[in-house]
């Protein structure tokens, strides 16, 4: 059995949207903090990784949303290592309301073990595996399906932005959770360009709610780099729509990250699921613009 770690977070105002609901990117921040704490509890804190000259970087995240968190509520993140490969490891997460036990989200992240100096993959030492599996590890890693690829249509919406200081983490590049902020911002700018800004969503008594985020991280985005965030609908139905987003470096067109988001609509007060307005779906599937 793997070593299991738990940490509880109290929701702060800055982590919520205009409806008082925690933004999805902040769930990733809770997960990342819990993962670092879990590693330290197993004997691998930041100082030990510095001494080893090694670092873990997230390569892929799958986040399934089952509920919501609101301002001043508390969430308990339960996390454990699911498996090890030669240079990669998968970590699992379960997020629940601290008071009620209601399920908020489940997730898995694939981490790559790298040499800090070169960024090259490094073999995971057996003593590290033993630290996270004190009762012994059965070498049966889960299969990793390929991230779904897609080419943007000619009329896909593109939002251009610069990497800002606030987006960076201690590794000196854009934090994994910040990419989900980029994805959400591009989606909302796309809606606004299609005639559905936040004010119109409020007037229509609907709020956007994601069911799942699948994110693949390919390359690092560095300070002051110019990015092109391109987003489009892969499919659309009244209950669920599927959005694909690609983040590229403008200088060379290299893909830095991509995301698949399944989403729908809820009533902003009751938070019950409601159909996506037909006019919104029609606008999103019409010709889109570049901003």
Image: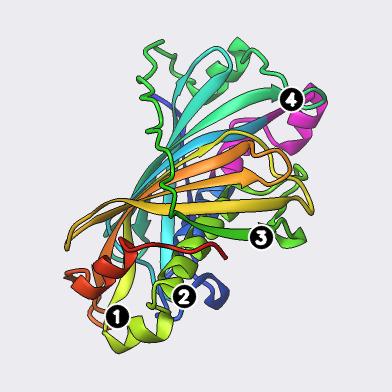
Label 4 residue SS: loop
Q: Is label 4 or label 3 in front?
A: 3
The tag earlier along the polypeptide, 2 or 4, is 2
Q: CA distance from mark 3 to mark 1?
A: 29 Å
Label 2 residue SS: loop
Q: CA distance from mark 2 to mark 3?
A: 21 Å
Q: Magenta span: helix, strand or loop, mainly?
A: helix
Is there CB contact under 8 Å for labels 2 and 1?
no
Q: Residues within 10 Å of mark 2 (few under 14, many from 20)?
A: few
Q: CA distance from mark 1 to mark 4?
A: 44 Å
According to the picture, the residue beneath numbered tag 2 turns out to be 17
Which residue corresponds to the image point at 74% horizontal and 29% vertical from the top-left? 49
Q: Residues within 10 Å of mark 4 (few under 14, many from 20)?
A: few
According to the picture, the residue beneath numbered tag 3 turns out to be 161
Is there CB contact under 8 Å for labels 2 and 3?
no
The tag earlier along the polypeptide, 2 or 1, is 2
Question: Outermost residue toward the bottom?
Answer: 203
Q: What x and y, as percent, mark residue 203?
A: 31, 89
Q: What x and y, as percent, mark residue 81?
A: 46, 29
According to the picture, the residue beneath numbered tag 4 turns out to be 119
């Amino acid at each position: 059995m793997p070593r299991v770690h738990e940490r509880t977070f109290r929701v702060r105002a800055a982590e919520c949207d205009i409806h008082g609901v925690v933004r999805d990117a902040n769930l990733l921040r809770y997960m990342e903090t819990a993962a670092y704490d879990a590693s330290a509890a197993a004997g691998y804190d930041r100082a030990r990784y510095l001494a080893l000259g090694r670092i873990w970087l997230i390569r892929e995240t799958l986040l399934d949303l089952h509920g919501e968190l609101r301002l001043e509520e508390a969430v308990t993140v339960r996390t454990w290592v699911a498996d090890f490969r030669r240079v990669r490891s998968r970590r699992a997460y379960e997020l629940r309301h601290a008071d009620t036990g209601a399920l908020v989200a489940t997730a898995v992240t694939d981490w790559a073990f790298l040499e800090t100096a070169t960024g090259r993959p490094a073999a995971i030492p057996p003593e590290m595996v033993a630290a996270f599996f004190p009762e012994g590890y059965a070498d049966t890693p889960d299969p990793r399906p390929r991230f779904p690829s897609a080419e943007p249509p000619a009329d896909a919406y593109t939002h251009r932005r610069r990497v800002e200081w606030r987006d960076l983490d201690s590794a000196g590049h854009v934090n994994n959770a910040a990419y989900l902020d980029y994805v959400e911002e591009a989606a909302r700018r796309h809606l606004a360009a299609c005639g559905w800004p936040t004010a119109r969503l409020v007037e229509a008594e609907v709020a956007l709610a994601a069911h799942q985020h699948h994110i693949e991280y390919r390359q690092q985005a560095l300070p002051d780099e110019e990015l092109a965030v391109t987003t489009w609908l892969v499919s659309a139905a009244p209950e669920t729509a599927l959005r694909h987003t690609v983040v590229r470096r403008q200088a060379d067109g290299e893909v830095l990250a991509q995301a698949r988001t399944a989403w729908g609509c809820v009533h902003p007060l009751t938070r019950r699921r409601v159909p996506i307005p037909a006019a919104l779906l029609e606008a999103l599937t019409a010709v889109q613009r570049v901003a």
